[in-house]
Each structure stands twice: as structure tokens, then as C-alpha cells.
């Protein structure tokens, strides 16, 4: 396939791509430009030529109602808040993740991945609601002793090699455009759990969805990466 020159990812996709690029030492190209929702979001070829080609789908649990509420609140100039309690589910984080991966929305994204030829199939998940973020953050947040919460191994869907969970992001809110420190949890089908901390330049991210959030970075300062490619395997 051929992507138009200057093609860029969405804000959420770019966060995932930049994080994965730091961890895996790769260069991700858009795989779905011009293909609607039929193709995974990104693809890459490992530079050493030993591991072959990887593809990734960046997604989150459905949140149409929540996003509508946030958009309405922003339009009205109000602050949106979420109500309700969150179950701690101590020692059950693996079960929470496995149930998500078995849900219909996840299966749709997994089937999209597996329909494409590759050597590695990655699913990158982020949360939109406080409930999802709570569980995802716990996968990579350290405790007072610097240790992460013990989590059992996941049962990955057949064919999926890696599942990533976007964790907590920290930034200096007093300085728009300051780097973001992002925590990640990753489960690999053979080696199990891995945790990472990466730094992402806010100025390298596209503008956030204007219907959901104001952009605190002055206009013209953002320069997201050109992820166009002449072929899907470049």
C-alpha cells in the first residue's frame, strides 16, 4: 500500500508509537492510512532483519457515552467528572486483563491484526475511563519500595505475541510542551511481564482531540513525526 506523504498518527496512536519505538528500537509507519478501519494502525521491520515484520493495533475499551459527556462538558465550559466506585480486585489484575482480551471489542481488533501477515502481532491498550486507567496504572506503578504489584501471567489470544498497557503519565504542567514521563506494562507470550519508563516529547505529539481537551501548547510548536511510507513493509 502507499500512504500519502506527511501522514501522521492520531494523538493516542502517536503516544503508543513513540513509546514502542523507544523500547523496541524500531521505526513505525502508518499501516492504515487510506484503508479506513480495515488495517492495523502501525507496522515496522526490525533493523537487524532477524525478527522480521511487526504490526500493532492501538485501541481502548469502548467509551462512546463517556466521550460524548466529555465533549458536552467542554463545549459548555464545564469540568467533567466521573462518578462511581472502583473495585480494588486485589490479586486479580490478570483476570481483569484476560476478561478484557476476551471481550467482543478486543476480539474485533485482534482479528484485524491476525488477518494481516506478520511475524509479531502487538495490541496496545489505553484506558479512557478512570476505572480502566486505575487497573492499567497498577500494572506498572511502583510501590514505596519501587516494586510493582505482582500480576499472574496472562492467557494471550492465539496468535498475539504482545499486549501493551499504557500506564501513568507525568509532566510538568507549569511548562506547556515539557517532556512526558510515561510508564508501560507489556506482556510477551514467551518472556512474560516487562515494565518500562519512557520519555516522550509533548511537542512531537499531534494536537489532542479539540472536542475533548484544549491544547496547552501554543499553535505552530507541535511537529509530529511523518509516518508515511511508500510500501507497507518499508
Image: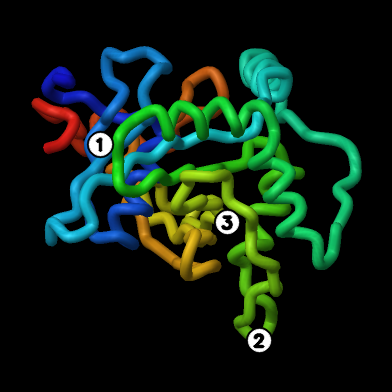
Quadrant location of the N terminus?
top left
Mark 3 or mark 2: whose residue is earlier in sequence: 2
Question: Quadrant where the C terminus lies?
Answer: top left
Asked if residue 128 lies left or right of residue 56, the reply is right
Q: Residues within 10 Å of mark 2 (few under 14, many from 20)?
A: few
For residue 82, side relative to residue 195 (left or right): right
Residue at the spot x=69%, y=67% of the render? Answer: 152
The residue positioned farthest toward the front in the image shown: 158
Q: Is there CB contact under 8 Å for labels 3 and 1?
A: no
At x 41%, y 52%, the residue is 175
Q: Position of residue 32 (x, y in %)?
A: 31, 23
Mark 1 or 2 closer to N-term? Answer: 2
Query: In this view of the protein, which residue sits in the foreground, 132 or 34?
Result: 34
The residue depicted at 63 percent of the width and 80 percent of the height is 147
Quadrant of the rendered image containing residue 121: top left
Q: Nearer the viewer, residue 139 or 130?
A: 139
Rendered view: 49 above or below 145: above
Residue 127 left/right relative to 110? right
| Residue corresponding to mark 2 | 145
Distance CA(mark 3)–CA(mark 2): 18 Å
Reading the image, the residue beneath label 3 is 168
Q: For numbered disc 1, what is the local secondary structure?
A: loop
Q: Residues within 10 Å of mark 3 (few under 14, many from 20)?
A: some
Residue pointed to by mark 1: 224
Q: Secondary structure at mark 3?
A: strand
Quadrant position of residue 14:
top left
Q: Which residue does the image show at 26% across and 31% down from the upper left?
A: 30
Who is closer to the viewer here, 165 or 203?
Answer: 165
Q: CA distance from mark 1 to mark 2?
A: 36 Å
Amino acid at each position: 500500500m502507499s500512504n500519502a506523504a506527511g501522514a501522521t498518527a492520531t494523538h493516542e496512536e502517536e503516544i503508543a508509537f513513540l513509546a514502542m519505538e523507544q523500547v523496541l528500537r524500531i521505526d513505525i509507519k502508518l499501516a492504515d492510512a487510506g484503508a479506513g478501519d480495515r488495517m492495523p494502525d502501525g507496522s515496522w521491520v526490525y533493523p537487524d532483519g532477524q525478527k522480521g515484520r511487526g504490526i500493532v493495533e492501538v485501541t481502548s475499551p469502548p467509551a462512546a457515552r463517556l466521550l460524548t459527556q466529555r465533549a458536552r462538558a467542554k463545549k459548555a465550559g464545564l469540568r467533567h467528572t466521573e462518578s462511581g466506585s472502583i473495585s480494588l480486585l486485589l490479586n486479580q489484575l490478570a483476570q481483569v486483563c484476560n476478561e478484557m482480551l476476551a471481550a467482543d471489542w478486543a476480539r474485533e481488533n485482534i482479528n484485524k491484526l491476525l488477518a494481516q501477515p506478520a511475524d509479531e502481532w502487538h495490541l496496545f491498550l489505553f484506558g479512557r475511563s478512570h476505572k480502566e486507567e486505575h487497573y492499567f496504572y497498577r500494572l506498572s506503578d511502583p510501590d514505596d519500595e519501587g516494586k510493582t504489584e505482582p500480576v499472574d501471567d496472562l492467557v494471550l489470544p492465539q496468535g498475539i505475541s504482545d499486549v501493551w498497557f499504557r500506564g501513568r503519565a507525568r509532566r510538568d504542567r507549569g511548562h506547556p510542551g515539557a517532556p512526558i514521563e510515561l510508564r508501560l506494562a507489556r506482556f510477551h507470550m514467551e518472556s512474560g511481564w516487562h515494565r518500562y519508563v519512557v520519555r516522550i516529547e509533548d511537542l512531537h505529539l499531534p494536537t489532542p482531540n479539540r472536542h475533548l481537551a484544549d491544547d496547552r501548547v501554543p499553535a505552530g510548536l507541535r511537529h509530529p513525526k511523518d509516518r508515511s511510507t511508500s510500501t507497507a513493509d518499508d
